[in-house]
Image (tube, rainbow, N blue to C red):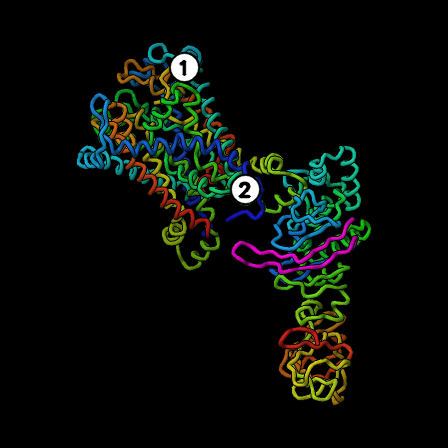
Amino acid sequence: MAAVTLEGVSKIYHGGVQAVRNVSFDVPDGSFCVLVGPSGCGKSTLLRMIAGLETISAGTVGIGGRVVNDVEPADRDIAMVFQNYALYPHMSVYDNMAYGLRNRRTPKPEIDERVREAARILAIEPYLDRKPRALSGGQRQRVAMGRAIVRKPQVFLFDEPLSNLDAKLRVQMRVEIKRLQRSLGVTSVYVTHDQIEAMTLSDVLVVMNAGQVEQIGTPIELYRRPQTRFVAGFLGSPAMNFLPGRIGREPGTIMLDERPIRIATPPAAAPDTQVELGIRPEDLRLVPRGQAGALAMHIEFVEELGATQLVHGRIAAAPATVQVPTGAIPPEGTIELAVDPAATHLFDVASGRRL
Amino acid sequence: MEKRAVFGNRVLPYGLLAPQIAVTLIFFYWPAAQAVQHSFLVQDAFGLSTEFVWFENYKQLFSDPSYYRTLATTVIFSTAVTAVSLSVALLLAAMADREIKGATGYRTLLIWPYAVAPAVAGVLWIFMLDPSLGMISRAMRPLGIDWNPRLNGNHAMTQVVLASAWKQISYNFLFFLAGLQAIPKSVIEAAAIDGARRWRRFWTIILPLLSPTTFFLVIVNIVYAFFDTFGTIDTMTGGGPAKATETLVYKVYADGRLGGDLGGSAAQSVILMFIVISLTAVQFRFVERKVTY
Amino acid sequence: MVERQTAFSRIIPHAVLLTGVAIVAFPVYLAVIGSTHETAVIANGQMPLTPGREAFDTYYRTIFTGGSRTTREPVGTMLLNSFTMAMLIALGKIAISILSAYAVVYFRFPFRRAAFWMIFVTLMLPVEVRIYPTYKVAADLGLLDSMAGLTLPLIASATATLLFRQFFMTIPDELVEASKIDGAGPFRFFFDTLLPLSRTNMAALFVILFIYGWNQYLWPLLITTRDDMQTIVIGIKKMIVTSDALTEWQVVMATAVLAMLPPVAVVVLMQKLFVRGLVETEK
């Protein structure tokens, strides 16, 4: 087992495109780290640099206290699960899992023991003699996991391993990956663009954007206190509402469309600074008409989710979404919403940082 | 298109390339360079001295009426082979395409002549068309045709064209059938709903959609007629009678075999190279389009 | 099809196709018939369309002793020569092409593009256009009348290299990366993954190249002078004597049948691979 340490890691491609800029963070031994961000944010490149599949332009990558910048992928003691699984199509499931061990001259009985153990854990024992093409997507995914497990590496690397599965299977495999990682206790780095995967799987969550780290922390920290507008908008579904306004003269108020809204902690910024007030859809509460400090929302349409409804509309001119219990809302007209002052997030329009 | 994942070895790739590069240099580039070099030289009668003469060999070639005759023969021959084999193959492919069920069965019955060597194809057709013992020539006699390819140049040309086209039908059939089966059925149904009858559909929808295949096959057939039919011509007529079936490739061979004019033969080779290169270039422009589709 | 089919319109395609098959097959049918009759029957132009009784005799004599007047070698030797030549050309081409394609696709090194273009250009130089200079090179190297001289100049060509390159490009990058992580270097990746994955392509290419090699005419004609080096395609030509009287047509036809048999059998028996090979090499 080993921690992964990144210090000032950058990737500059030929032609000067900077895919990763000066990234530093630690993944503690045995923890599950998820890199999340929109496509093109550099998360996969970063993962591939940890794997040794991309050269490192600047900075150092350490695994278990050893700098591995110039170490071949095979010698980094890592295992990787690819998005398209990258199973060897001409080898049986058994041989796919055994291949890496054979290349390392592991004794035959031990290979057999490890492969069968992994197959048992992943419930793919009946398919050991099959070729990958005779397996379903979920089964291939398990074989790819098995290939990683048998190696007993110091670090697992996952490159969007679930994105080729259908929605139901994805949820199931997500749970399984988490359980597996817990029981094996192997340090893992996992890349995804799916924020639900990111939230549910991670001990350490790294949100990336445009080659840089936006914020690192536990998933709940990032959800509760996003440090940038980007993180606030990226995590959470449905996404946070952003209402444009400015800081009021009276301490602890924000002026939305010339109406003051009260917030819990007064920001350390001058009055009249342009801001965005972030409120999650579940933090808006339906109140009777005419209550003081309430926001009026004009309903545009309602999405029925079963237990709850998503109401889409506009607060002042800004598009907004509210999540309320089913049946609470008329299909059209205007509703009034109260804001919990403690559940607001305030971002500086100019810098995008939290105030 | 380039691979993202590659190996880092520095020396290994040269080792992997070495065999092919060696053979290519020795048997392609060296002879080709020699051909170009010789085409600028004139050798005396005893092969003792050579003289650099610039484009003299080419000038001589292009002022020689027999070279133009060979050129005309080549054009007539390749046009005829291409036209005959393409039209027969298209007819058969269109018929097979109608009856999808039997199509693969007919394909098996039609593709094997591809495997017959051009020289052997020549022998098979002589056996049928030989003026004294050939079954077909016998059958023509009562019709008042005095079939004699050994004396009549047109007869000789006809038999060489038939044998060469016969061998190429299978190849063309295969590609036409594949092209026809790649045309979406919905397009043909839409044309039918628009009121186009079968014959009209063939001319206004199917043939235009098939044009990339046709174009590709035209080039392939011309190249075939130019170069691959050497064996057919050599076994059937030996270029005769009176050079009536002598194509450019055959002339290079015949002139060189008689020894003598090394420079002239080399100049002919160089001209042939230009012809192949331009044909291949045309074909590759087309292939590029096919890839981007 | 779109229209309702009448009995008539259903029959036409079959009628046309069967006629086509008959025309295509007729020359070969005649050759088979011809190989079963006596010289005299054929020479006087009275050969019937049904098989004669000389089949066994003719084939036995053709294969093991050779014709009495015109050929000096039994066709058995020629068959063996043709087979050796075709195998060497096919296997040799596949071997050197897969190696060079591997180098060009999976490595980065100076002059990579130059090497690729150098191979690519040879696509445009069929042996026929540079026949005498090539002959001279082979003669200078002492390769006349040898298997090496017969096959080497025909072994290098761009087609197979391009085909393998095309195929390697479709193999996902992740497979190389997974191999690297599994501890496989370039040799292991080649033998454990690339070669097994290329099996079908190699087989398809083999079918095409075997036929290509078997049917070679001009080059063997020049390079071989000794009778025991003759291939069957060359041998058959030498059996036809200009004056009909001397030509043993039944032996010629038996030889023709024997010359067609191996490549035609390959095409018919491995039709799927053949079609694939033909289509792939034209990409």
The nearer-to-camera label among 2 and 1 is: 2
Residue found 75% across the figure and 47% down from its top: A154
A108 left or right, relative to C203? right
Label 1 CA crowd tier, 10 Å (few <14, some 14–19, many 20+): some
Looking at the image, can residue C54 be seen? no
| Mark 2 residue type | Phe
Magenta stretch contains residue A2: yes
Tell me the chain of label 2: C
Image location of residue C132, percent across then percent down: 32, 27
Residue B83 in magenta? Answer: no
Residue C82 in picture, x, y percent from top left? 44, 22
On screen, residue A85 versus residue B202, left or right, reads: right
Mark 1 residue element: helix
Q: Nearer the viewer, residue C261 or B108?
A: C261
Residue at 54% from the left image edge and 42% from the top image edge? C107
For the record, the magenta segment spans A1-30
Alpha carbon distance from label 2 to label 1: 44 Å
Q: Say which element carries label 2.
A: loop
- The quarter in which the C terminus of chain A is drawn is bottom right
Name the chain under label 1.
C
Up/down of B78 relative to C35, above or below: below
Q: Which residue is mark 2?
A: C107
Q: Main secondary structure of the magenta part?
A: strand
Query: Along the line of sight, which residue is nearer the eye, A58 or A148?
Result: A58
Amino acid type, mark 1: Asp
- In the rendered image, residues at marks 2 and 1 fall on the same chain: yes
Q: Position of residue C251 (x, y in %)?
A: 37, 16
- Residue bearing mark 1: C228
Q: How many marks?
A: 2
Residue A160: percent from the left, percent from the top?
Answer: 67, 55
